Image (cartoon, rainbow, N blue to C red):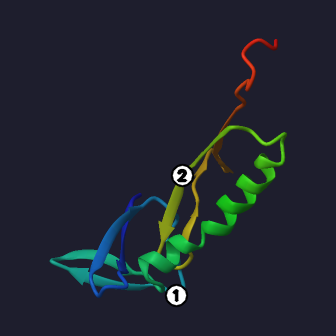
């Protein structure tokens, strides 16, 4: 069941995110907003999203080492949780990554 998680923004605002992640039993603080239960995240939205940087950077570095493609596209889903922040989203029990690599022929006369 989807839950609502409230993240503070570094500029003092707030953002509420719908999360399908399992309910956390420790660390999060349920609060009520207009009668709706919202979990209060431990970290700011920006800090939570910062957790995906090493994941994306590691995948991109590894893929660029594959004969240095001209174009590289990496798509992945994230789930926002009150306890852990941003985590790779899972489908059927495993994380999903969609990767596209393209090489362009610099000399169109070569096969």
Quarter of the rendering occupied by the N terminus: bottom left
Observer-nearest residue: 45 or 62?
62
Q: In this orientation, which residue lies closer to the viewer: 51 or 23?
A: 51
Q: Are marks 1 and 2 in contact (CB under 8 Å)?
A: no
Q: Give the class, few, some or many, for how many residues have Cα within 10 Å of label 1's Cα (few <14, many ≥20).
A: few
Residue underneath mark 2: 77
Q: Which of 27 and 14 is in front in this view?
A: 14
Give the left or right position of residue 7, taking residue 82 as reference: left
What is the number of the mark on residue 17? none
Residue 89 located left or right of residue 80 = right
Residue 73: x, y in percent?
61, 42
Disc 1 vs disc 2: which is toward the camera? 2
* Disc on res. 27: 1
Residue placed at 60% from the left, 72% from the top? 51
Q: Residue sitting at 72 percent across and 30 percent down?
A: 103
Q: In the drawing, does residue 18 fall left or right of residue 88?
A: left
Residue at the spot x=57%, y=55% of the render?
Answer: 89
The quadrant of the picture occupied by the C terminus is top right
Of residue 60 and residue 2, the one placed in the foreground of this image is 60
Compared with 72, 7 (above or below) is below
Please identify the quarter of the rendering in which residue 19 is found.
Answer: bottom left
């Amino acid at each position: 069941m989807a839950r609502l998680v409230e993240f503070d923004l570094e500029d003092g605002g707030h953002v509420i995110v719908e999360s399908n992640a399992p309910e956390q039993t420790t660390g999060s603080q349920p609060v009520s907003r207009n009668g709706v239960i919202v979990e209060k995240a431990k970290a700011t939205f920006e800090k939570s999203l910062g957790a995906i940087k090493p994941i994306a950077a590691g995948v991109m570095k590894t893929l660029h080492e594959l004969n240095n493609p001209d174009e590289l596209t990496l798509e992945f889903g994230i789930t926002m949780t009150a306890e852990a922040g941003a985590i790779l989203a899972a489908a059927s029990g495993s994380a999903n990554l969609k990767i596209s690599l393209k090489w362009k022929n610099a000399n169109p006369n070569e096969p």
